Image: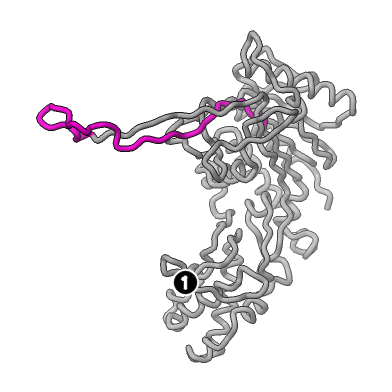
């Protein structure tokens, strides 16, 4: 089962996702310059949202370079290991590379790995067990100091299945350390692109000293203390997500690595997948990227959400609905974008005989809008309920 989420969302002036110069990200598509929000930005805004974090508390990992300090904390909590804590952190600082080379202290006086890694509690616990066992076996700080971080990393090599979190199972993980296994993402997220051509604008701003007055008189040099500008745009975006339900379940239970665990835990994994997809859908709809939001507060909800549940893993993005930039029609840019989207979806569905077990559409502001062979729903709650029933009622490929 493949679950595809299509969203059309118009944002007021904003700088949601900046490039290295501070400008809103952009791209060329269909020969025109478009506004763009990267897939990394979209995934992080979902993963770090309060909604997602609260719904999946206890089932999430942490992306960090601070594994050495997490190990230090665990050493310091054990009276018998406290004297090894500093050395343990230093040795674990090498776990972010194949070579396992230990690193110097960071500027803040703490150790960090060279690579930012997506780590679960099970990962951290395993590293602690390996390093603490080595410390106990060494028996003295001096002998422990002579151990190499590379050897400890090799001892911590992941050989079998280790439980992973929902976010790792969804978005995947790639690491160079042999202490942790790569995970193939079960979710693909496209870069959001504007349905129309976009030109950036600049906001010129100043800051003035509130106290630059004496007895009601303006001081001679009471002009702007600071001037600057920030680039922004306004765009209607098309967003696309596809989730491989079976791949998601397989990641959670390690079906390929350990069939016994897969058989025993599949029912619990299916239940968790239902909860996770509900949180993912709600977050994708309700949460906007955080870039420059204190300056722009561009928190608009989507005009359209379309979900298609396909029996086969044959993803279809409808981005080409906008290969010709949409122009503002008599009903406005958003309505024109929806019309272009509908025409494209219906043409591809008929022309390529696209199969879908279920298709639902949410478009609260456009009560008369419809797509052939797609069922409308009245609310996000109803959409989530339909998806949950579908996900939990399906059979797996096991």
Residue extending farthest to the left is 215
How many marks the image carries: the answer is: 1
State the residue position of label 1. Answer: 105
User: What residue span does the magenta drawing correspond to?
Assistant: 210-238
Q: Quadrant of residue 80?
A: bottom left
Out of 111 and 24, give the one closest to the viewer: 24
Q: Quadrant of residue 236?
A: top right
**Rendered residue at 68%/12% (across/down):** 368
Magenta stretch: dominant secondary structure: strand
Q: Is residue 158 above or below residue 213?
A: below
Q: Is residue 266 above or below residue 113?
A: above
Out of 241 and 373, give the one closest to the viewer: 241
> Is residue 301 covered in magenta?
no
What colour scheme was applied to this rendering of the protein?
A: one colour
* Side of 83 relative to 316 (left or right): left
* Side of 131 relative to 84 (left or right): right
Q: Secondary structure at mark 1?
A: loop
Q: Residues within 10 Å of mark 1 (few under 14, many from 20)?
A: few
Q: Position of residue 105 (x, y in %)?
A: 47, 72
Q: Quadrant of residue 16?
A: top right
Out of 395 and 231, give the one closest to the viewer: 231
**Rendered residue at 69%/52% (across/down):** 269
Residue extending farthest to the front is 220
* Side of 111 relative to 250 (left or right): left
Specify the quadrant that holds the N terminus. Answer: top right
Q: Position of residue 175 (x, y in %)?
A: 67, 63
**Rendered residue at 59%/43% (across/down):** 41
**Rendered residue at 55%/45% (across/down):** 20
Q: Position of residue 26 (x, y in %)?
A: 63, 35
Q: Position of residue 143 (x, y in %)?
A: 53, 91
Out of 32 and 254, give the one closest to the viewer: 32
């Amino acid at each position: 089962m493949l679950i595809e989420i299509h969203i059309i969302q118009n944002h007021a002036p904003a700088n949601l996702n900046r490039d290295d110069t501070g400008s809103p990200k952009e791209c060329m598509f269909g020969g025109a310059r478009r506004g763009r929000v990267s897939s990394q930005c979209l995934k992080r805004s979902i993963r770090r949202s309060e909604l997602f974090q609260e719904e999946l508390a206890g089932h999430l990992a942490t992306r960090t370079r601070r594994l050495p300090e997490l190990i230090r904390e665990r050493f310091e909590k054990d009276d018998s290991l406290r004297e090894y804590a500093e050395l343990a952190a230093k040795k674990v600082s090498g776990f972010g590379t194949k070579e396992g080379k230990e690193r110097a202290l960071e500027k803040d006086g703490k150790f960090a790995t060279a690579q930012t890694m997506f780590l679960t509690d099970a990962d951290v616990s395993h590293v602690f067990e390996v390093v603490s066992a080595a410390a106990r076996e060494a028996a003295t700080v001096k002998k422990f100091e002579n151990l190499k971080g590379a050897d400890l990393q090799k001892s911590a090599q992941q050989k079998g299945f280790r439980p992973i979190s929902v976010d790792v199972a969804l978005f995947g993980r790639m690491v160079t350390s042999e202490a942790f296994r790569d995970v193939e993402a079960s979710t693909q997220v496209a870069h959001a692109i504007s349905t129309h051509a976009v030109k950036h604008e600049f906001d010129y701003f100043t800051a003035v000293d509130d106290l630059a007055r004496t007895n009601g008189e303006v001081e001679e040099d009471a002009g702007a203390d600071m001037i600057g500008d920030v680039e922004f745009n306004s765009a209607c975006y098309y967003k696309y997500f596809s989730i491989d339900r079976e791949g998601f379940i397989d990641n959670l239970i390690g079906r390929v690595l350990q069939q016994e665990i897969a058989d025993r835990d599949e029912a619990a994994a299916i239940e968790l997948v239902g909860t996770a997809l509900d949180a993912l859908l709600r977050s994708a709809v309700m949460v906007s990227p955080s870039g420059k939001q204190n300056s722009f507060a561009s928190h608009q909800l989507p005009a359209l959400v379309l979900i298609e549940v396909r029996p086969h893993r044959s993803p279809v993005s409808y981005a080409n609905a906008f290969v010709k930039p949409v122009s503002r029609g008599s009903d406005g840019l958003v309505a024109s974008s929806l019309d272009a989207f509908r025409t494209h979806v219906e043409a591809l569905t008929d022309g390529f005989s696209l199969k879908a077990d279920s298709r639902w559409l949410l478009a609260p502001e456009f009560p008369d809008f419809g797509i052939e062979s797609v069922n409308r729903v009245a609310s996000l709650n109803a959409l989530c309920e339909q998806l949950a029933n579908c996900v939990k009622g399906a059979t797996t490929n096991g």
